[in-house]
Every structure is written in structure tokens, then in C-alpha cells.
Image: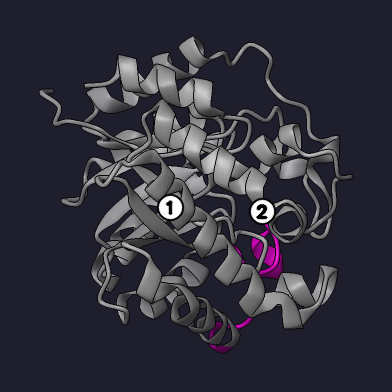
Amino acid sequence: MTNKHCVILDGGMGQELRRRSRQPVSPLWSAQVMLNEPELVVAAHRDFIDAGAKVITVNSYAATPQRLARDGEESWFESLHTAALEAAHQAREQSGADDVRIAGCLPPLVASYHPDVVPDDATCLASYQRIVAMQAERVDLFIAETLSLQREALAAAQAAIASELPVWIAYTVSDDNGGQLRSGESLADAAEAAQAAGANALLVNCSAPEAISTAMPILAQRTLPFGGYGNGFQAAANLKPGGTVEGLAAREELTPEAYAAYAKNWAATGATLIGGCCEIGPEHIQSLRTSLP
């Protein structure tokens, strides 16, 4: 298959900040750094841009109303989102890369990888509408990411589409079966539902690269741009709601060159949106830039 030019996304902000910060890991990890060490966030964004990323995602993954209520203070919501937006804009301005787009972040509301804790539909929609309202005026698109349940993704899509900005939906799939979400739902059905809801692109993220390789031909059956960004954990699903990544082990063999080899296979299926998630750093993004069309 002849492939179009790939758009390179950034890598995993949370793990990158963990490497750079001297603070102890907390359930609100990336948000806690946003409060205490915002300069690290600017620097990490900047390093991803310098490595070749043309899309950077706002560092607000942990700043949902539900996670703040459980792990911090609900009153931090506005200040965290404001600070995260400012950090992304500072990094883009410092880089001088006017062609870099800033993506708003619509993450799982309660916990990654655990569809069983997703709130009811009305709560999901209201929470995503709050996040969209905070970010819409200062982002170029929205990425609803690491979503393990179709109805949570559709609530995020509904909220984001109302902003009239482009909306990318990124599901997380089973590491053992890239053809299904972590909920057990079919990726093909979830992709069809996201496209019908008005998504502008379809992705699979925060899953093992091998699972993403299985998922790419499924997304290729749709008519939308598609892609993926994998993680470098040995077993991401072991992370419990309210837990920290401290107990998750990284795959030492997933070097920048090894990760780029997976990505080249994704591109061969027609994927044009490729980046990295947890444990995928600027050096991996650099490798993508030099390896992909």
C-alpha cells in the first residue's frame, strides 16, 4: 500500500515527567507535577516538539472531576487545566514551530484500563463538557484517548464535537487481542460507532505495540484517517484505579529502533497518525521521525 505522509504525535508525558521530577509518585502524578513543577512540563513538551512531534497533547490527563475528587481537590480543576494549556502554548512558542498543533485531552474519567468503573452516561457527558469548555478556546483539536468502553468514548465525542474542532477517538485495546477493547467490545464496532458519531480520526493507544499491529487493519476498514500510539509497559492492565504506575515494569527491549519497527508496519497498513504513549519518550519520537514516510 502506498502511504501518505505520517503525522508524528508526541510520546508519554506522565512517564517522561516521572523520569525528570524529584517528587514522589502519586495517583495524580502528571497533574501533581503541573502544580509543583510546571517548568518540567514545558520542557517535556518542548523536547517532544524538537524530536519531531507535530501534535502535542495538553498535560491534563489526570485532571478529571472524578479523579480530583478521589485523589486531590475538586477545586483544582480550573487551575490545573489553565496551567496545562499555558505549558503547551509556552512550549510551542519557545520552539518556534508554528505547524505544531495542540490537542485537548479527554481521558478516562475515573481510571485507565478499567471499563467497570466508568460513570453513567449523563455523568460522562457532563464531565467531558466541563473539560471541553475549559480547553476549547486554546486547542486545535481534541483527542479522546485511552478509552476502554464504547459508551465513554461516545460521550467524549459528543462533548468535543459540539466545540466544532476536529475530534480524534483513541481506544485502548486488550494486550492479548487487539481486535477488542479492554471492555471486551469489538474494535470494529467501536470504530464504526465513533465514525457515525462524527469523529474525524480513529486511533488505538496505550496498548502493547503487538496489539496495535492487530488493530491497524481493522481501523483501515473505515474511511477516516487512523493510527496508533503504543505504551512500553509489560502489563499496563495491572494498574488499579487510584493506584500509581510505580508498580508497572517497562519493556527494556522496546528501544527507539524497536518501537519504530512496529510503527513502520502500522504505516504500511495506511496509518498516518503515529506517536507514543507511556514509556515512549522523545528519543522514540525522534526515531519515528527518521523512520516513517
Q: Residue at x 47, y 65 (%)?
A: 150
* 89 with respect to 124 (left or right): left
Q: How far, Cα to Cα, is label 2 from label 1?
A: 26 Å
Across the whole image, how many numbered discs are drawn on residues?
Answer: 2
The stretch drawn in magenta includes residue 181: no
Residue 236 point in image, percent of width and height: 69, 39
Q: Residue at x 51, y 15 (%)?
A: 256
The span shown in magenta is 107-122
Q: Residue at x 26, y 63 (%)?
A: 195
The overriding secondary structure of the stretch rendered in magenta is loop
* 246 with respect to 83 (left or right): right
Residue 29 point in image, percent of width and height: 76, 52
Residue 206 point in image, percent of width and height: 55, 42
Q: Amino acid at mark 2?
A: Pro
Q: Secondary structure at mark 1?
A: strand
Q: Nearer the viewer, residue 52 or 151?
A: 52
Question: The C terminus is located in which quarter?
Answer: top left
Q: Residue at x 64, y 48 (%)?
A: 39
Residue at far left of view:
2
Number of residues whose C-alpha sits closer than 10 Å to that of mark 2, classed few (under 14), some (14–19) or many (20 or more): some
Residue 60 point in image, percent of width and height: 59, 61
Q: Quadrant of residue 74?
A: bottom right
The stretch drawn in magenta includes residue 114: yes
Whether residue 248 is visible, yes or no, is yes
- Residue matched to label 2: 38
Q: Earlier in the sequence, mark 2 or mark 1?
A: 2
Number of residues whose C-alpha sits closer than 10 Å to that of mark 1, classed few (under 14), some (14–19) or many (20 or more): many
Whether residue 262 is visible, yes or no, is no
* 75 with respect to 255 (left or right): right
- Residue matched to label 1: 170
Would you place residue 99 above or below residue 156 in this image?
A: above
